[in-house]
Amino acid sequence: MVTIGNIQLPDFPLLLAPMEDVSDPPFRRLCKAHGADLMYSEFISSEGLIRNAIKSRQKLDIFDYERPVGIQIFGGDEEAMGMSSEIVSAVNPDLIDINFGCPVKKVVCKGAGAGVLKDVDLMVRLTKAVIKGTHLPVTVKTRLGWDENSINIDEVAERLQDVGIQALSIHARTRAQMYKGEADWSHIARVKNNPRITIPIFGNGDIDSPEKAVEYKNRYGVDGVMIGRAAIGYPWIFNEIKHYMKTGERRAEPSFSDRVEAAENHLKWAMEWKGERLGIVETRRHYTNYFKGIHGFKEYRQRLVTTDDAVGLADLFLEIRDKFAVVDTF
């Protein structure tokens, strides 16, 4: 079994990546129901937590049914990271994760996320501050380096392990790549095979099928994989990977009814958590993925993203079920 502090995970656990505006409680609940072993919150600004910003505080919401779950924080100031670590600890997640990998300009320009990859000494100090501020296990998610000429993941892994992190997730791209090009997992394999490294190493980047998950497991020897974009609108990927690992065969894809049920639950849970209006608006981005590839669905997709009330959406889902009743799998 894979262990992070006192958290016991299955052999080769499947992790849901922390994704801004995606990995909220409703989405995590769906992924948990479909096989995710460990999940993370959206990343939370340490400065926002200290300022008591409403959006940052709301991201601290976790629920017992989704455990084990980690809360991810980011920032470039040691004092702020230490204080936010204490704040996060008070809501009792299973672990705290530090984001040293977000490539978005507005984060990097603040000396946070992937911006810290330029200064490993600062990365170490920030990590120490978080560890000092909590009794919980601390993990890190990062990238290979700033660009192809400054790949420093080997040094990062050793130094962060030395100061006390208990697992490391590596996105196999540099900051310069953003999300483009092919992820190079050979660097992750090198970290995993380093005899000095004893903590779990999780790989992230381009895992979008059961076959690829098993291939990368065997080729690179990682302790588990973290799945991000491939789970958006398709939470079934976790159980599909588990089934393939166990049997060597593809699990049947979700039926149309399965997809409708997932979309309805996502909307329902979003409205319960965020309120009706915000829940409706923020679920709209997911419908395209839930109903991807369904012939003749364009009209209904447009109606899903323009209907403004819960009753109207409930009626629309009933109409969709009736219209596509003959659709099974595809």
Image (cartoon, rainbow, N blue to C red):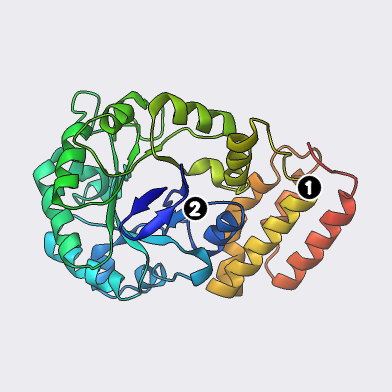
- Measured from the top left, where is residue 266 in percent x and y? 63, 61
Q: Quadrant of residue 26?
A: bottom right
Q: From the viewer's perspective, is 254 left or right of 42?
A: right
Of 123 and 271, nearer the camera is 123
Residue sitting at 68 percent across and 33 percent down? 250
Q: Which tag, 2 or 1, sits closer to the chain's start?
A: 2
Judged from the image, the secondary structure of the residue bearing numbered disc 1 is: helix
Q: Callout 2, which amino acid?
A: Asp
- The x, y position of residue 102, in whole percent, is 32, 45
Q: Determine the residue located farthest toward the front in the rendered image.
A: 1
Q: Position of residue 321 (x, y in %)?
A: 84, 55
Instruction: Please tell me which residue is depicted at 35% across the width and 74% down the height of the picture.
Output: 91
Residue type at mark 1 is: Phe
Residue 106 position (above or below residue 293): below
Is 187 rendered above or below residue 266? above
Q: Are marks 2 and 1 in contact (CB under 8 Å)?
A: no
- Residue 310 found in image quarter: bottom right
- Decide: is 216 above or below 265: above
Circle 1 residue: 256
At 24% from the left and 68% from the top, the residue drawn is 135
Relative to 118, is 275 above or below?
below
Judge by depth and name the residue closer to the eye, 329 or 131. 131
Depth check: give the residue in front, 69 or 301: 69
The secondary structure type at the circle numbered 2 is loop
State the separation of the CA atoms marked 2 and 1. Answer: 25 Å
Question: Visible in this render: residue 182?
Answer: no
Q: Residue at x 18, y 67 (%)?
A: 133
Q: Residues within 10 Å of mark 1 (few under 14, many from 20)?
A: many
| Pointer 2 residue | 37
